[in-house]
Amino acid sequence: MYAAPHGKALVERQGYFSPSGVEMTFSRAALKLGAASLVAAAALFTAASANAGTNWSIGINLPGVVVSEPAPVYYEPAPVYSRPAPTYYQPAQPVYSVPAPVYYEPGSRWEERRAQRWEERRAERREWRRQQWEREQYRRYYEDRD
């Protein structure tokens, strides 16, 4: 709101004032166009700087004058080859030891049990063969008669 120039009632108007006090009016289309262009420019520059990682600077590229001493030069000395001194050693004295005496019993219980089991199995096999032979003989004598 502002006061009218002739002291009349306050009137509400839309508009902008210049520093000299003159009212400036803009159309809505011009304001929308300006706002849209500002948003587009901000998006363009923000996206370009975010993706490209660009930098800029202003400078004058002139070669500088450098005065310094040359780098020191290091020469590695030539390798020296020499034969190692001979080494003499005396072999260690041989060590002789007598083994501990070993005593064996004449008849081992294990051997006795092994022999006994062997004889038991042998007797079982003989008995089985005898029974098979008897069955075969019975079959031949009684079953094959026609």
Image: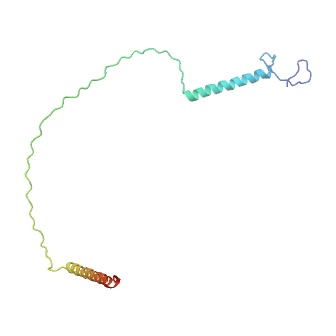
Residue appearing at x 16%, y 80% in the figure? 107
| Vertical order, 136 against 17 (above or below) | below
Q: Position of residue 39 (x, y in %)?
A: 68, 26
Given residues 115 and 79, the one toward you in this image is 115
| Vertical order, 85 against 119 (above or below) | above
Given residues 10 and 132, the one toward you in this image is 132
Direction from residue 89 to residue 4 in the image, left or right:
right
Residue appearing at x 55%, y 27% in the figure? 52
Q: Quadrant of residue 26?
A: top right
Q: Position of residue 117 (x, y in %)?
A: 25, 80
Given residues 43 and 118, the one toward you in this image is 118
Residue appearing at x 33%, y 85% in the figure? 142
Q: Position of residue 131 (x, y in %)?
A: 29, 83
Q: How many marks?
A: 0
Direction from residue 129 to residue 108 in the image, left or right:
left
Residue appearing at x 8%, y 49% in the figure? 89
Q: Residue furthest front?
A: 146
The quadrant the N terminus occupies is: top right
Q: Quadrant of residue 146?
A: bottom left
| Vertical order, 63 against 44 (above or below) | above
Q: Position of residue 56 (x, y in %)?
A: 54, 21
Q: Colour mode?
A: rainbow
Direction from residue 50 to residue 91 in the image, left or right:
left
Direction from residue 30 to residue 9 in the image, left or right:
right
